[in-house]
Amino acid sequence: DSRFSQKLPLYWALFFLIPTFYVYDTFYLFIAIVLCALYFLPFRVLSWFVLIFYLAVIYFTPKPFIDVYTISSMAADFFLKGINPYTQHYPDIYDGLYGYAPIFAYLPGALYLETISKFLFYDFRVVLVLAWWATPFLFPTSQESEKLKKMWWLLPLLPFGFIQAWLDPLIAFFAGLALWAKKNKRYGWLIIAIAFAASIKQYGFLIGFFILLALLMQKEWKVFFRLFFYSFVLFFLLVAPFLFWNLDALIHSTIQEIFDWKPRMDSFNLIGLILSIKKNLNVSYINTLGLVMSLLGFFIAIFHVKKNGQANKFNVIAEAWVIVFGMIIIFGKQAFYNYYSLMVSFLLLSMAFKGNAKKGQ
């Protein structure tokens, strides 16, 4: 139904009301009402009101009680003072509840962007808002683009994600930039997108992996090797300062500690459900299941690109991201709102970039 389709962004935003009634939080209820009201604004001014609204949300919540915010904010401060954030000790605001040491676990690319944001705007979360807000401007023009942009900007619980300081909007932005750059043959921007995505979070390399795989399927050999080489060089330049500053600290914080994390019972996924039923289940079984299913999703995504990527359909790449990230989320050690918002962003990107490229693109 066309009327339902046109109002889909409004229904999308209304979903935000459900959890606000559950937690009975007046502040989030107010946010939900504003989020729904934004739908009725003329589209030509919607983007600016959305930006102002989300910036206001984070500035009115200066100190959320979550380790992500506390640690990332301190890491940016350390870096601004010329101190290596990967060698510092951070407070455990949960008093050992989750059994892992508080560390700055993100890769250097995230640190650079968050530090710049804190220096310029006094809050590192501003870059997260700007990244998510800017991504729809990369969507190709189509009959559906206006509706998809509204859905992107009115994603339920998005304000909650900004408040909590989850940095997945950065991955979503560079994923959108990568698809836009590939479609328009802006290979310089594509190199930047691939390298930065890989340098932000540990699974960010998957953004570039499936783009490069699609190029192989299209037999674009020269483009593939050039992109692979320069993306790797830029990635190395992004992480190199910390490789030489303190290699052991970087490896410990971004690799070793994460492998030692235990699965969390409060995760919003199948692993969390299993642990809530079988509380004494051997952790090694859970870790093995998660690894096997993540690899299965990885190979299914490869098969999807191999089977459908020859036609140069840009949405196939985004669909591959959905498949592999979906399996990682469902069977991962932990999964919260930010993981699902990232997967939804890939779904919206697949819809926005749906269709074949013209010959030569």
Image (tube, grey):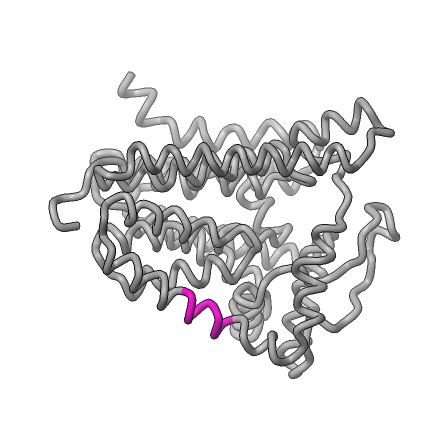
Residue at 72 percent of width and 52 percent of height: 66
**Residue sitting nearer the eye, 153 or 329:** 329
Residue 51 in view in this figure: yes
> Looking at the figure, which quarter contains the N terminus?
top left
Find residue 360 and report its horizontal and vertical position in percent: 13, 50
**Is residue 193 rendered to the left or right of residue 30?**
left
Find residue 198 and report its horizontal and vertical position in percent: 49, 58
Residue at 41 percent of width and 50 percent of height: 209
> On the image, which quarter does residue 227 sit in?
bottom left
Q: Please, which residue is most extreme toward the left here? A: 359
**Is residue 129 rendered to the left or right of residue 227?**
right
> On the image, which quarter does residue 150 sit in?
top left
Q: Please, which residue is most extreme toward the bottom here? A: 82
**Is residue 17 rendered to the left or right of residue 26?**
left
Q: Which span is picked out in magenta?
A: 232-238
Find residue 284 and report its horizontal and vertical position in percent: 77, 37
Task: Name the chief secondary structure element in magenta.
Answer: helix
Say above or below: 202 vs 12.
Answer: below
**Residue sitting nearer the eye, 45 or 9:** 9
Q: For residue 121: magenta?
A: no
Q: For residue 233: magenta?
A: yes
**Residue sitting nearer the eye, 262 or 151:** 262
Find residue 186 and report its horizontal and vertical position in percent: 24, 61
